[in-house]
Amino acid sequence: MLPIERDTTHYFANGDIVISSVNKAATSTILFRLHKVVLNHHSQVFSDMFSVPEPQAGGQELYEGCPLVHMSDSAEDLHYLFLYIYDPTAILPLNPIPTDSHFNQNHVAILLKLATKYEVDSLRNRMIAYLEAYWPSSLDEWDKLREWYHDPYEWCFRPEPVQAINLANAHDIPSIRPTVFYFLSTIRPDRDLDISEQRNDPDSTSPLAARWNSLGAQDLLRVMQGRQKINDFLEMVNPFLDGDDDIVELPCLMEGPETCSHHLLEFWDRVCLRSFRNLDPLDTLTHFRDLYDGNLLCDHCILRVERNVDRLRDLFWVRTGGYFEDDDDDELIY
Ligand SMILES: [Zn+2]
């Protein structure tokens, strides 16, 4: 029999129900003394659980005069759930910051699991809103977060994409999938977070990594196919040469055979090459000035590139979402 301890926060002298749970290390049983009326208010599952006496010989098991209920969730996880139920402002940040050491995607994962299991709808909705803030569907929002996600000094706390995909699958949150899949597709498969953590060097900074081993086979295939579609898209278009109304509005000013077109071709080749290497065309296009020499282009062609880069990133962002879905229709994409 394990030693018994009382939870430091949630053992109320006037509570009328005692919940017992074993800690993760399986070294102690933790007791929570709570109020039925509070738990019932948040959760129909709790309400049903407490209204049925346990069918034991000798009647309901009691602890200090209160009904005693054993729960299979870890004491640490339940502690979080009861923190939310009794004092939500103590744990939930007003504005979710994905790299917050005190509350980040790891905490969301715990609370989302319990909120779903015990049907605490307000908590579940809040956790989904946090995930949508960590993995926004708008490119502007993603651009703001991207720098944090790539910051090697934030690596302990930045949201891990495979965990996010598994949460989206388990809890039916399709809204975050396009952004998570795109981000995961920018991470090299030999950058494995489990291995980085095993090295456990506190002074080292970590490159971008993912828990590749936790990714399901179907989702891994999705990443590979999405990456291929991105590369195909980059190779098939040259947005600065064809298929755009601005070309009519902004004809090249160079006369004769020496137009800017071959410089634009070379520029786009460099965009493709860097994107194949860094796996991140959106980032490549953000830093496109590293890759082209405005001195070689006429004023119209410079304007054409400058105007179209943002538009191209927007278009790419919208299409990318479809590249990682099963019902992606190639004819619509190209
Ligand atoms: Zn030109």
Image (spheres, rainbow, N blue to C red):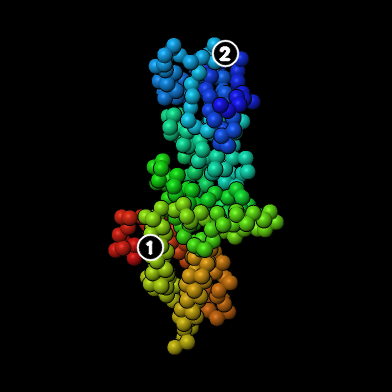
State yes or no: Cβ of the residue under disc 1 lies below 8 Å from any atom of ligand 1: no
* Label ID, residue 192: none
Q: Quadrant of residue 223?
A: bottom left
Residue 73 position in % (x across, y down)? 49, 32
Task: Give amino acid for label 2.
Answer: Glu
Kindly tell me whether residue 223 is visible in this rendering: yes
Quarter of the image that includes the N terminus: top right
How far is disc 2 from disc 1 in space, using C-alphas? 60 Å
Percent x, y for residue 4? 60, 24
Indicate left or right for 321 with 74 as reference.
Answer: left
* Residue 116 vertical position relative to residue 239 in the rendered view, above or below: above
Q: Is residue 100 above or below residue 193?
A: above
Dot 1 alpha-carbon crowd within 10 angstroms: few under 14, some 14 to 19, many 20 or more: some
Residue at left offset 53%, top offset 19%: 18
Tell me if residue 282 comes above or below residue 175 in the rendering: below
At a point 54% along the width and 43% down the height, the residue shown is: 106
Residue at the image position 49 percent from the left and 24 percent from the top: 70
Q: Is the CB–ligand 1 distance for label 2 below 8 Å?
A: no
Looking at the image, is mark 2 or mark 1 earlier in the sequence? Answer: 2
Query: From the image, which quarter does the C terminus lie in?
Result: bottom left
Residue hosting label 2: 64
Q: Position of residue 265 (x, y in %)?
A: 46, 78
State the residue in front, 254 or 132.
132
Q: Nearer the viewer, residue 244 or 188?
A: 188
Which amino acid type corresponds to the residue marked 1 in the rendered image? Gln
> In the picture provided, is 264 more to the left or to the right than 80?
left
Above or below, comparing residue 305 to residue 119 in the picture:
below
The residue where tag 1 is placed is 225
Query: Can you tell which of label 2 and label 1 is closer to the viewer?
Result: 2
